[in-house]
Image (spheres, coloured by chain):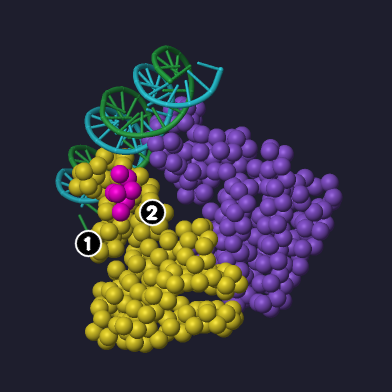
Chain colours: A yellow, B purple, C cyan, D green
Amino acid sequence: MVDAAADALRQMVLDGTLEPGSRLRETDFSKRLGIARHTFRAATQILINEGLLRRSPNRGVQLAVLDGDDIVDIFRLREALEVEAIRLVITGKKEIPEAEDAVEQFNALDDEASWRTVVDLDMSFHRAVIDAAASERINRAYAGVQSEILLCMAQLRPHYDRPAEVAAEHRELLEAIEAGDLKVTEDLFRKHLGDATENLTNALEAREEVTA
Amino acid sequence: MVDAAADALRQMVLDGTLEPGSRLRETDFSKRLGIARHTFRAATQILINEGLLRRSPNRGVQLAVLDGDDIVDIFRLREALEVEAIRLVITGKKEIPEAEDAVEQFNALDDEASWRTVVDLDMSFHRAVIDAAASERINRAYAGVQSEILLCMAQLRPHYDRPAEVAAEHRELLEAIEAGDLKVTEDLFRKHLGDATENLTNALEAREEVTA
DNA sequence: TATCGTCGAATTGTGGAACAATCTAGCACG
DNA sequence: CGTGCTAGATTGTTCCACAATTCGACGATA
C-alpha cells in the first residue's frame, strides 16, 4: 500500500502534474491519496531515496529542482554505471536481445515519431545494457539515476535530434558492444552520454532565460 | 530522532551486536531504543536502503546475510564508482590530501597494528578518492556500498596481509593517481579491488565450512 | 509414532488522534 | 518602512487500535 502510494506519487512527479519545487503537504496528500499520514511519509521516503523529492527538517518534502550541476552529476554516475555494465557485458560475452529490440524499433520510427516514443526507446536501450550486466546493485543504483533523468525530461523538454539520427547512434553503440572492443565501445558511450548531458544542459539554460 | 535511531541501529549491525540474519522485532526494538514503533520503522527504512537490512512482507526486517554472489556484486559496483572517481580526479587534476594522509598513517603502522586500524585506514583511503571526485551522487552511491562492505567485515574476519604490504599497495595506488596515467591507475585499482573480493570470498568459504 | 490440521498468540501493516516543536504569515507597533 | 509578536498551519513523534498474516504449539487421526 505504501508502494502503491509511492507509485502514484512518482507518476504525478514524472507527469508534470506537480510543479517543480512545489511542497507536498502531508495532510493534504494523505487525504487525497486516501492513506494515513504515516503511510504517506513512508511513501515519500522512497521517492526521496530516488532523488525525486527532498526533505528539509521541519519544512517537509518538496519536489526536487535540478540545476545544471545536478544534470552533470547525474550523468557522471550514469556514465560510471553504464561503462561498467558494458565492461561486464563484453568480458562476459553476454547477449542483450532487449537492446537489439530497441534498436529495431528505433529503425522502424519515422520522422513524425513523438518525442515521448524516442525517449522511451532511448531509456529501454540503456536499461537493457544495464540489465544484461546482471548486477543487482548496479541495477538498483541505475534505477535511481533513471528516475532523476525522467525528472529532467519532465521538467525540461530538451531538443532531440531526428529519430533517424538517434536510431543510428544507438545502432552504432550496439554494434560496438557486439564487436567486443571494450575501449572503442567505452569511448562511444562516453561520447553519447556527454552529448546528452550537453543537450540537457542547453535545454536548462534555455528555460532559465525564459523564466528569468 | 529517526536519524539517531538509524545511527544506533547501524552501530549495532556493524558492531556485530546483532547476529547475521536475526530478526528485528518492532515492539522489541522500539521499546529498547525508547522510540515509537513508527519511528523505528522509519529508521529501519534507512538501513534497508543502505542494504544492511532486508524486509520481507509481513515478516518484518532481518539483518542481511551476504553470500558470495553479494560480495562479488558489491565489489562490481564499488569498482564502477572508484574507477569513475579516479577518472574524474585525474582528468580534473584534483588533489587528494586525505588519501596522502592515509598512506602516511599506513607507513607509520608496525606489524602489530590491529586489524581494525588497517581496515579503517583502507576505508578512509578509498573514501578520500571518492570524495576528491566531488560528485554528490557517486558519493551517495558509494556510501551504500561502504556500509555493505563494513557489514562484510563485521560478519567475516577476512585474512589481511601484513600492514606493511597493505601500506605499500596503497602507496602504489596513490602514486599512480598522482602520476596521472589513467589506464595504469585504473588497472591497478581493478586489481586491488579484485584481490579484495577474492580475499573476502575466501573468508566466506572458510566460514561456510566451519558452520557446515 | 508420525503427519497433518487447527487454533491461538505474536507480529506486521495501517489508520487515527493527539501534542510539542517549529515554521509562516499577517498584524500591530515603533 | 522595518521589526517584533501572535496565531494558525505544518511537521515530527507518540500512543492506541485493529485487521491481516505468520508462526508455533497442541491435539486428532491414521
Residue B130 in view: no
**Relative image position of residue B92 (x, y in whole percent):** 59, 76
Above or below: residue C25 compared with residue A66: above
Q: Earlier in the sequence, mark 1 or mark 2?
A: 1
Mark 2 closeness class: few <14, some 14–19, many ≥20 residues within 10 Å: some
Give residue A126's quadrant in the image. bottom left
Position of B90 relative to B100 (above/below): below
Name the dominant secondary structure of the magenta segment.
Answer: helix
Q: Is residue A121 above or below residue B158?
A: below
Residue B28 has which mark? Answer: none
Q: Chain of mark 1?
A: A
Left or right for B187, reference A66: right
Q: Is residue A6 magenta?
A: yes
Q: Which chain is home to disc 2?
A: A
Q: CA distance from mark 1 to mark 2?
A: 18 Å
In the foreground, A94 or B139: A94
Where residue A208 appears, as percent x and y from the top left, is 31, 75
How packed mark 1 is, by other alpha carbons closer than 10 Å (few <14, some 14-19, many 20 or more), is few
Residue drawn at 47 percent across, 72 percent down:
A96
The x and y percentages for residue B143 are 55, 55
Q: Which residues are magenta?
A: A1-7
Determine whether the residue tagged by mark 1 lies in a helix, strand or loop.
loop
Amino acid at pointer 1: Thr
Left or right of residue A91: residue A95: left
Task: Provide the residue designation for mark 2.
Answer: A48
* Residue drawn 35% across the image and 84% down it: A107
Residue pictured at 25% horizontal, 64% vertical: A15
Q: Which residue is mark 1?
A: A17
Which image quadrant: the C terminus of chain B?
Answer: top right
- Amino acid, disc 2: Ile
